[in-house]
Amino acid sequence: MLENFIKEARELNTYDLEHIEGYKLYYSRIKNILSLLTYLALIGFGLFLIISDTRNEGKLLGLFSFVFFLYMLVKTIGNLMLRNPVIILTRDKIYHLKTNQWYSLYDYELSDSSNRTLAFRRKNANGYNEFAESRWELNSDDEFMSLLRVYTHSLERKE
């Protein structure tokens, strides 16, 4: 099922989160504009393949790249429209905007995987992911991760 990122961004902008205390992590406008420009160039390349290539393989590759990068373009536009913080970190809880839920740092952990995706998951055998955000699209992600390490370390010392 295709997601409507623009409709979702409009809906998420209606939440009032400014009064909540904590470290707020937003989508980076500069990084998302760079992604937007890259996707536009790749969509243009897909259209070029569809129009200019006489072989079926080139047209199929062009069509696939056009549809995929159009989907990613709409997702990036949705990120640019979002005004609220995506993640809010307090001393013992973390909030994720898209799930509209608070998670306790006691019961969950944030992992920083090698593909720069911020994955929030339960500490269980299943490894069930509650949410995942691309660190490329976020601003101040390194500062957020260092602050998160400080908070989780202080929670471990309290136990």
Image: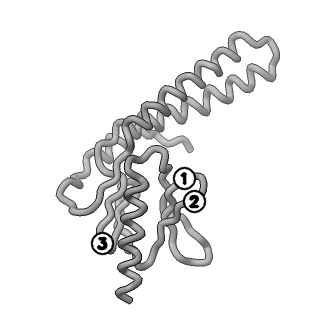
Residue matched to label 2: 113
Q: Residue 98 or 112: which is nearer the viewer?
A: 112
Vertical arrangement, residue 156 with respect to residue 128, above or below? below
Q: Which mark is residue 132?
A: none
Is residue 142 found left or right of 69 in the rendered image?
A: left
The residue at 73%/26% (across/down) is 61
Q: Measure the C-alpha gap from mark 2 to mark 1.
A: 6 Å
* Distance between mark 3 and mark 2 Cα atoms: 23 Å
Q: Nearer the viewer, residue 3 or 87?
A: 87
Q: Is residue 65 above or below residue 85?
A: above
Across and down, in percent, residue 77 comes to 42, 33
Q: Nearer the viewer, residue 152 or 53?
A: 152
Q: Residue most toward the bottom? A: 159
As helix, strand or loop, the secondary structure at mark 3 comes to loop
Could you tell me which secondary element the residue under label 1 belongs to?
A: loop
Based on the displayed image, in which of its 4 quarters is residue 89 positioned?
bottom left
Say which residue appears at 36% left-offset and 57% top-offset. Answer: 87
Tell me how far mark 3 sits from mark 1, CA to CA.
Answer: 23 Å
Disc number for residue 116: 1
Identity, as a three-letter code, of the amino acid under mark 2: Ser
The residue that appears at 51% across and 68% down in the rendered structure is 121
Q: Amino acid under label 3? A: Arg
Is the C terminus in the top left, top right, bottom left or bottom right quadrant?
Answer: bottom left
Tags 3 and 2 in contact by the CB under 8 Å rule? no
Number of other residues with Cα within 10 Å of mark 1, as a class: few under 14, some 14 to 19, many 20 or more: some
Q: Are marks 2 and 1 in contact (CB under 8 Å)?
A: yes
Q: Residue furthest left?
A: 19
The residue carrying mark 3 is 91
